[in-house]
Amino acid sequence: MRRAQLEETVAVAHSPIEQFEIKPLFQMEIAGFDASFTNSSLWMVIVVSFMSLFMVAGMRKSAAVPGRWQSAVEVLYEFVAGMIRDNVGREGKKYFPFIFTLFVFILGLNLAGMLPYSFTATSHIAVNFAMALFVFVGVTLIGFIKNGAGYLRLFAPSGVPLWLLPLIVLIEIISYCTRPISLAVRLFANMLAGHIMMKVFAGFIISLGAAGVAGMVGAVLPFGVTVLLTGLEILVACLQAYVFTILTCIYLNDAMHPGH
Amino acid sequence: MSEAHTEVAEQKGGLPQLNLATYEEQIIWLIISFAVLFLIVSRAVLPRVTKVLEEREERIATDLDTAERLRKDAEEVKASYEAAVAEARRKAQELILGAKDAIQADIAKAQAELDAELGKKADEAEARIAKAKDEALAGISEIATGAAVDIMAKLAGVEGEDAAVAKAVETALASRKGA
């Protein structure tokens, strides 16, 4: 009986999806909506505070010859500015603040998820889909405002034989409409899979460690894997923030220049 | 173990990501935090970075301009310096040539003076020698006549034949001279 209880607590504590559980810290309402402050909200607030502090404090001197901290902020700026310059062009400058915020926000949330006992807000499809939908609606609106009905040219690439056109248009429309889904699911799936893998391998260490000396020796292997996975996940955290941002830039470019 | 897993999952309603009840609060806090970050980024961060980068670019451009200007100045200075050096060298060459000519003229003049002086002295000395020779030659006949008179008086006791002796000596000397 005691053994069964122990197994259950171990299972609960080490269930690989337990880390994604949203736990309300206190209840509150904003304009009639349920705006309970949860562990997800807490980490969003932490990330926003940290990133703001990092950037504002880094730029406090605004020195012509930057120190290390200021250089880090400038590198971040140049990185996103370069992404927009290369993928959207000059007209993209207007959307720089939004895209910069998007990158910093997702990067911060992804990296914060790598801290022990933290929560990865971007591992939730609701958050990712809300961002992806905002980008999708925004890009579509920009496309129609800039080009009017000419934006529909996006669905009919030039140089396609006439008999193939209906099929191509159909495919283009489907691919356009699935953009927010792929954008959201890509980030969600990467975060989810990575964190589950880490939890599973970390769980192996505990389970093997509980099984005596031989188990402890055997636990070295999952420990090594966990170390490697941690490095991989930090890479994925940065990469997925980059992917989300660069796809936003590419969609924005489509909205600016619809003819392929 | 697997049983425990399913039990837990069922109890919590599957993957927490699919729990629709949490969507509202997640999205509301996403909007709040994203909006706050957007405001801070667009108001406090990006303008400052843009300003710093622009100022730096401007400063670098100005510095490059200044460097270019200074380089041109330096080149001008170098060119004028080289011209001055060439001019000085040319003048020095002229001075050297002038001095050489003057010195050579001086030397020639001194040489000529010296030659003239030496020639004069040689002439004088020659004249003196000729005179002394003449004087010596004139004395010779007188002494020879005296000696011949004395010899004749002592050896032959002939006296008072001075004029004849002088004449004979004169003839002898002339024949010697002629020889």
Image (spheres, coloured by chain):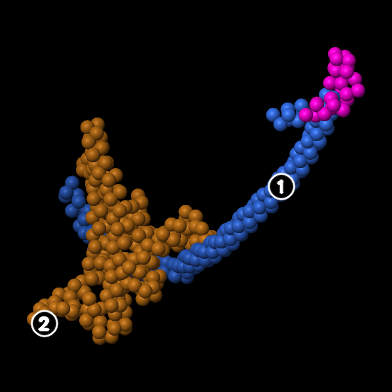
Chain colours: A orange, B blue
Q: Position of residue A212 (x, y in %)?
A: 24, 33
Using the image, determine if residue A229 lies above or below residue A154.
above
User: For the residues marked 1 and 2, what is the alpha-carbon distance in whole angstroms?
Assistant: 118 Å
Quickly name the residue at label 2: A162
Chain ID, mark 2: A
Q: Amino acid at mark 1?
A: Ala
Q: Which image quadrant for residue A22?
A: bottom left
Q: Which image quadrant for residue B16?
A: bottom left
Q: Given this view, does label 1 or label 2 mark the residue nearer the observer?
A: 1
Q: Main secondary structure of the magenta part?
A: helix
Element type where label 2 sits in the image: helix
Q: Which image quadrant for residue A221?
A: top left
- Observer-nearest residue: B141 or A154? B141
Of all residues, the one furthest to the top in this rendering is B155
Residue at 85% across, 17% down: B151
- Observer-nearest residue: B36 or A257? A257
Using the image, determine if residue B169 lies above or below residue A239.
above
Residue at 88% across, 15% down: B157
- Observer-nearest residue: A89 or B22? A89
Q: Amino acid at mark 2?
A: Leu
* Residues marked 1 and 2 touching at CB (< 8 Å): no
- Point out the stretch of residues depicted in magenta: B146-171
Element type where label 1 sits in the image: helix
| In the displayed structure image, the side of residue A116 where residue A55 appears, left or right | right
Rendered-image quadrant of the C terminus of chain A: bottom left
Using the image, determine if residue B14 lies above or below residue A256.
above
Dot 1 alpha-carbon crowd within 10 angstroms: few under 14, some 14 to 19, many 20 or more = few
Q: Does B153 appear in magenta? A: yes
